[in-house]
Image (spheres, rainbow, N blue to C red):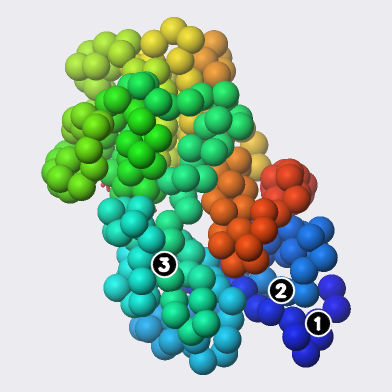
Amino acid sequence: MLLSGQTQVVGLFGDPVAHSLSPVMQNAAIQAAAIDAVYVPFHVTPANLPAAIEGIRSLGLLGVNLTIPHKEAAFPLVDELDPAARVIGSINTIANRQGRLIGYNTDGSGLCQALRGELDVDVSGRRVLLLGAGGACRAAAVALAEAGACWVGIANRTLDRADRLIADLASAVQGTRFASFLFDEQLPDRLGQSVDLMINTTSVGLHGEAFAASVLSCVSPGGAVYDVVYSRQETPLVRQARAAKLAAADGLSMLAAQGSLAFALWFGQDPLPEVMRQTLQQHGSE
Ligand code: NAP
């Protein structure tokens, strides 16, 4: 990669940031598209986030991604919000348009792209169960509702958090019914085999932890399971779902899809197909 006086800079703000696969994925896509740009990881602490966001403007960065713990904190610090990001309440991408900072959340739409591409699932008219009630769940719920899911259940081990989330969503999103559940061992008894698609939006599985396999009995025969967690090996949930003869995929495809959407927002063009995903697969297996 040759940097010139005109090289444009995009990057990632996170704390920590060193573990992220986004730099290798975005730089591979930038090189494949022969764009004079570079994607740089920046270790930004919460206390420095306002100054770092102001730095996007003062240094003329084309944009950034935001990762843990900045997605919610950055929300009020931009000049304008994409409508979906406004409902979600957090942003993972900022685009600098002539000094005006626009916040987007590409996680939810990246998830819907990944569901179509990996599992051939169109969520329109479907019943979807989300495990978890954090930031990834909120982004997923908004995108699923926008894509026409008829029912979205949110099951969390802290019921109060799921209740608050569905109260917010029900007032902001039309056309989808929402329901909250306590995520415990009785969840399958309460739901029966009633969901077409189950999505894990918790961090469970990141370090090889597994849910009780009984959670899969919420999914109807022929249904599918998506795990937003990704790891070098098959995640425990994906392994359990495949053993139960359900279609299943992990979050690598979502990571690539949310990155592709951010790339398009910064550079005004899609990355070459499959470059991000293949790069992730290659580096995820090192
Ligand atoms: P978050 O806001 O901290 O929420 C975490 C959620 O996980 C909460 O609902 C929490 O429940 C639940 N949880 C944590 N440990 C649990 C356990 N042992 N049993 C049951 N539930 C548990 O985190 P987030 O930002 O939503 O991120 C969640 C995961 O999504 C992370 O692993 C992140 O890497 C992944 N993610 C992936 C992508 C992608 O592109 N593939 C994009 C975004 C996020 P409580 O409310 O009860 O604490």
| Disc ID at residue 93 | none
Toward the viewer: 187 or 64? Answer: 64
Which residue is under mark 3? 103
Assign a secondary structure to mark 1.
loop
Residue 27, quarter of picture: bottom right
Disc 1 CB within 8 Å of nearest ligand 1 atom? no
Asked whether residue 218 is in view, the answer is yes
Residue 5 x/y as whole percent: 78, 90
Q: Nearer the viewer, mark 3 or mark 1?
A: 3
Badge 3, how many Cα within 10 Å: few under 14, some, many 20+? Answer: many
Badge 2, how many Cα within 10 Å: few under 14, some, many 20+? Answer: some
Assign a secondary structure to mark 3.
strand
Tag 2: residue type?
Answer: Val
Assign a secondary structure to mark 2.
strand
Which residue is under mark 1? 3
Residue 155 x/y as whole percent: 26, 33
Q: Could you tell whether 65 is left or right of 137 in the image?
A: right
C-alpha span from label 2 to label 1: 8 Å
The residue depicted at 30 percent of the width and 13 percent of the height is 194
Residue 259 x/y as whole percent: 59, 55
Q: Could you tell whether 231 is left or right of 196 in the image?
A: right
C-alpha span from label 3 to label 1: 27 Å
Which residue is under mark 2? 38
Residue 136 x/y as whole percent: 39, 48
The residue depicted at 41 percent of the width and 67 percent of the height is 103
